[in-house]
Every structure is written in structure tokens, then in C-alpha cells.
Image: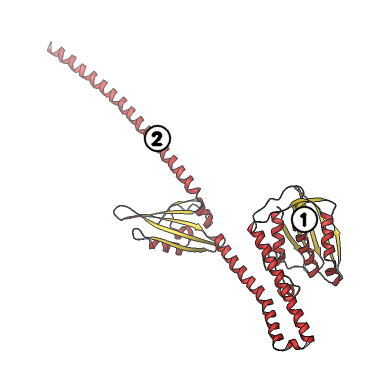
Amino acid sequence: MWPALTFVALAALALLHFWWRRRFAEAQQIAEREIEELKEIQLNSFNQFQSQQNALFDSMAEGLLLLDETGRIQLANRAFAGLFGVTNDVHHKTIIEALRLHELSGLVDQLDTENHTVEHELRLSSPEERWLQVNGAGIFNGNGQRHGTILVFHDLTRLKQLESARKEFVANVSHELRTPLSLIKGYVETLLDGAKDNPEVAAKFLQTIERNADRLKLLIEDLLTISELESGRVKLNLQMVALRPAVDKVIDDLKVRAGAKNINMFNRTPELSLRADSNRLEQVLGNLIDNAIKYGRPNGNVTVEGRLAGDGFVEIMVGDDGPGIPREALERIFERFYRVDKARSREQGGTGLGLSIVKHIVQTHGGKVWAKSELSRGATFYFTMPLNSGALQQPLL
């Protein structure tokens, strides 16, 4: 009987063992599945966090660079790539390997103590000139060990350009004012020293003083006009203006000036109307036609033409048959105080602001302005204005 009981007990133990192994295997499989699910959830959460973090960093206007404790790049956002013209993957590279900028690498080396920050202006010459303000800080743990570095880049290029333009503008204005003022002062002193007693000399000196005073008055008026235009405070009195009569009026006003050089003026504009501020339109036409008379050849021709340009705009052209404009000057002639021939321009009484005023008025109407020329074959100035749409008030450049 005992052998039978032993056999039954062993069989029961074997069955229990197999049952337990099966249940253990099932539990192990369930545990493994749960672990895999947890891993997948964690991975998805990490990827989602990483995506959100990258989206956040890429939405920043400032460039961001994150380095690990060895100085290798762990994160570089989209703004950073744009500022430095980076097209390749820079992850896990050093600053020297990625950018070849020893100056920036030296800044990182300065951040070797806790709570140490740096602020530095960095000038880049390629892919285009840029000025960047770099703010950097070391990342340290509770034990004072450095775990990495964070660098933030602010683009100062626009501010530097505006600062440079302001300095250049002040220098140009000072120069333009100094010349007539020096002449007026010199002639007045000469008159006071006795030249006033000679009627012939006194009359000649007074004419020179008057001419330079007129030039000062014109310069100040142009400065006030361009200041008003650039400030964006100009309110256009928009109305439908007949183009051909507007051109006729300007030509009639300049007829005496053209007659002095025996220049013929032709109005070949079509009979159409455009939506514009009539006074500002006449100011644009006056500047361009006056320049064509000044710099056109004696006994030559000045022609004003117009045509429909499409997209609801009319294109107006003012051409002369003078010496023309060098190719390298065509891109700059609309800059303030830029002159192709400085001596001749001043002799003609120009302020160097006329074409800049033309550009701003045209842009305020929503149009654009440009010029074409060949040396010895004259120059033609083009501008567009809307036919029926209101002014777009584009940003002034």
C-alpha cells in the first residue's frame, strides 16, 4: 500500500510542479508584456517630450546651443543653424569641428566656475556679415561639477545696420550743411572787412550768399520730407488722378529750366487714371523729370511714358539721353546722399535726397522704383503705382 501511496504522492507532486511551472511561465510572459508596454509608453513619452522640446527650441528667435561636459554639441536649434549658415548635422561635434570658430570656443573655456556667465559680441563675415550677442553660462550639479554649457545667440545685425546708417546720415547731413554755411560765413566776413564798399563785388558776393541760403533751405525741406516719410506718419490723400494731365502740369512747371538747356520734353503717357496722392505723385514726377533735365545732354530730349503693368498697376518711365549711369551705381542711386558725380550734383544744386524721397513715396503707395542705364545712352527711371487699389503702406527701407 505504501508504494502505491508513494507513487500517488509523487504523481501529485509532478502534476503540481508542471502546473506551477506553467502558471509561472504565464506570469512571466504577462510580466514581460507589461514591461514591454511600460517601455513603449516611456519611449513614446520620451519621444513626445523630445519633439515638444525640439519644437519649443526651434520656435525661438534666438539661436541656442547646448554642450555636454566634454564640449560636444547636444542640441542646436533652427535659429542657430540659420545664424551660422549650418547645413550639416553638428550633433556630437565640438565647436571647432562644427564652426571653426576659435573665438567662440574660447568663450566656452571661460565658463569654468559656477555662477560664471559671459556676454560677448561676435562678428561673422560669412555666409553674410552678422553681428551676434552671445550669452553663455555653465551648467553645474549640486557638487559643483560642470555638466555642460548653454549658449544663447541674439542677432544684432539689424541694430548695427541702423546704427551705422544713423552715423552715416549724421555725417552726411553735417557735411552737406557745412559747405554752404562755410561759404556764407566766408563771404559775409569778406563783406564786413570792406568788400561791401565795392558795389560790384558786394552784389556778386550777395548773390553767392543767396544761392547757398537757397541750397540750405532746400536741404532742410528735403530732410524734413524724408524724416516724415520714414517715420510712417505720412497720410496719403488718395484719389483718382488722371496721369497725362499730372505729367503735363509738371512739365509746364519745369519748362523754363528745360529751355535753358534747349531740352525738348515729351509726354507720351496714355489716357488713364490711377489711385494716388496727387501732390506726392507730382513730387515724384518733378524729381525724376528735374533730374533728367539736370543730367541730360543739352539740346536733348526728356520723355515720360506709361503703360499698364498688370496686377492692377501702371508703370511710368522717365528717360533722358544724357551720359547715363555706371552699372555699379544703379543699385545705390536711391540711397540717401548717394551721388554718382558728387561735384556735378552739388554744382547743379542737388541735395542727394531726391531719389530717396521718390523711393519712399512710391513704396508708401505700394509700388516699386528702379532704374536702367547704359553709359553714353541715357538713363530711364521706372516706378509703379496702383490703378484702383488703396495704398499698401509697405515698410519703408
Q: Is residue 144 magenta?
A: yes
Residue drawn at point x = 41 percent, y = 38 percent: 45
Is residue 378 visible in this depiction of the protein?
Answer: no
Chief SS of the magenta region: loop
At 58% from the left and 68% from the top, the residue drawn is 167
- The image position of residue 298, as x and y in percent, is 84, 72
Q: Secondary structure at mark 2?
A: helix
Q: Earlier in the sequence, mark 2 or mark 1?
A: 2
Residue with the mark numbered 1: 278
- Asked if one can make out residue 297 in the rendered structure from this viewpoint, the answer is yes
Quadrant of the image containing the N terminus: top left
Q: How many residues crowd around disc 2 within 10 Å: few (fewer than 14), some, or many (20 or more)?
A: few
Find disc 2 in the rendering and name its residue: 41
User: Circle 1 sits in a helix, a strand or a loop, which is it?
Assistant: helix
Q: Is residue 320 above or below residue 14?
A: below
* Numbered range of the magenta stretch: 142-146
Q: Can you give x and y, in whole percent of width and height, for residue 254 in the image?
A: 82, 66
Pick the front one: 325 or 357: 357
Q: Is residue 165 above or below residue 189?
A: above
- Quarter of image, res 26: top left
Residue 210 as seen in the image, left or right of residue 167? right
The amino acid beneath tag 1 is Ser
Q: Residue at x 23, y 22 (%)?
A: 17
Residue 53 drawn above or below residue 382: above
Q: Nearer the viewer, mark 2 or mark 1?
A: 1
The residue type indicated by label 2 comes to Ile
